[in-house]
Amino acid sequence: MNLWRLALLIALFNIMTFGNGPVMIPLLQTHLVEGTRVLTEDQLLYAFTIARVTPGQANFYVASIGYMLYGMPGAIVATLAIILPGYIMIPLMHGFEHLRDSHWIEGFTKGLTVTSVGLILAAVIQIARGTLTQPIAWVVLIAMLLMTQLLRWNIFVALATAICLGLLFKWLP
Amino acid sequence: MDKPTIYPDQSRTTLKTGLQKHKVKDSIRVTKGELFLIFLKAGLAFGGGLGILAVLEDELVSKRRAVTREEFLTIYGIGRIVPSGTMTALAVAYGYKFGGMPGTVIALLALSIPVFVLTIVLTIAYHYLRNSRLFGLLPITIMPAALALIVVAALKLGKDIFRPSRELIIAGVAFALALVVRVNPAIILLVGGAVGAFILQGNEEGKTTKKKGGGR
């Protein structure tokens, strides 16, 4: 793995997933964590957390991965790899508008979305095997799900509460 | 916090005919400075794609009337099929519309600077954390919470498919292939898209009762 190979992988994954941040997780997990082992599960999870707590586009966490592996050049190259395909927009605006109504593309993107739901959940289980080694971690995970899904708490509040919860369990006797 | 799911049907929001379309004079321009500020504001918006979209709508359609609602929705619709983030595509589109090629660079920079800077700062924080005693706390705090957030992202993407449907079968098969058979997810994703292109095209709302027998 070198910087250019990383850029190529990120560009490819970004294009395949239409720039959807979460959908890239299973791909990154397979190729960077399991395959080449240049990234740990912790690093991938941390990068994804960053994407959730920052404003702006949700696929920018690849800049974090770029930075972890190759410093600032890595971050910039990774960012360019996800931004540059955006220029396809210009030819599309010039007379290819009918593409929007293509049933094939509609079906393709639907298939992609649906497939990625299964893939993301599979990736979660794979990552969980490596990271959720302590019972407290499970408590925090479930609490986080409850806070965001059932109670619909703001992500910052939920994240802060989850962290406090983890610390509390750790330091209780 | 997600960018909108890549289901295209939401983009085809039906236009309220006549009344809500403002006629936009050609003279309404957005200067490069304004372009920068609008996209900087969008880049600071929380809530991922939808948050950014709301800012753009407010600035370009409601306030400045530089773009008609119809055009806004069309550009959004095209942006969704561009293989980068939709918001990246919108920055290119409006940058180009109001400032040509230099405009695209201005809009992209403005949109990306806030998230890029914050991402790098938080990544550097990770490096410091790594060398400290606090690092041992990550596996019981941030890591499980992050995993929960990934689950949430998947649930959000799939909010329409968790019921007996062809979609659920495809998702289930993808899940099993990835986890049990360990097929490369990139391949599964492409096959899933191709399968979708054949069997998921144009089936709208009222198909809740349909249930296909098996995933082959």
Image: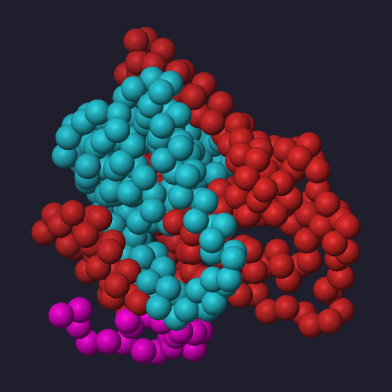
Chain colours: A cyan, B red
Residue B93 position by quadrant: bottom right
Where is B72 relative to B95, above or below?
below
Where residue A83 sits: x, y (%)?
A: 49, 43
Residue B142 position by quadrant: top left
Where residue A114 sits: x, y (%)?
A: 36, 67
Q: Which residues are magenta?
A: B198-216
Toward the top, the furthest residue is B132
Q: Residue at x 32, y 24 (%)?
A: A69
Q: Residue at x 54, y 77 (%)?
A: A98
Where is A160 relative to B209, above or below?
above
In this rendered view, identify the residue nearer to me: B206 or B61: B61
In this rendered view, identify the residue nearer to me: B143 or A139: B143
State left or right for residue B69 relative to residue A68: right
Where residue B205 sits: x, y (%)?
A: 51, 84
Residue A15 at least partly seen: yes
Q: Residue at x 65, y 40 (%)?
A: B102
Q: Quadrant of the C terminus of chain B?
A: bottom left
Magenta part, dominant SS: loop
User: Does the magenta-highlighted stretch encompass residue B209?
Assistant: yes
User: Does the magenta-highlighted stretch encompass residue A151?
Assistant: no
Q: Residue at x 70, y 54 (%)?
A: B97
Where is B132 relative to A173, above or below?
above
Residue B4 at least partly seen: no
Q: Report the label total.
A: 0
Where residue B14 sits: x, y (%)?
A: 68, 79
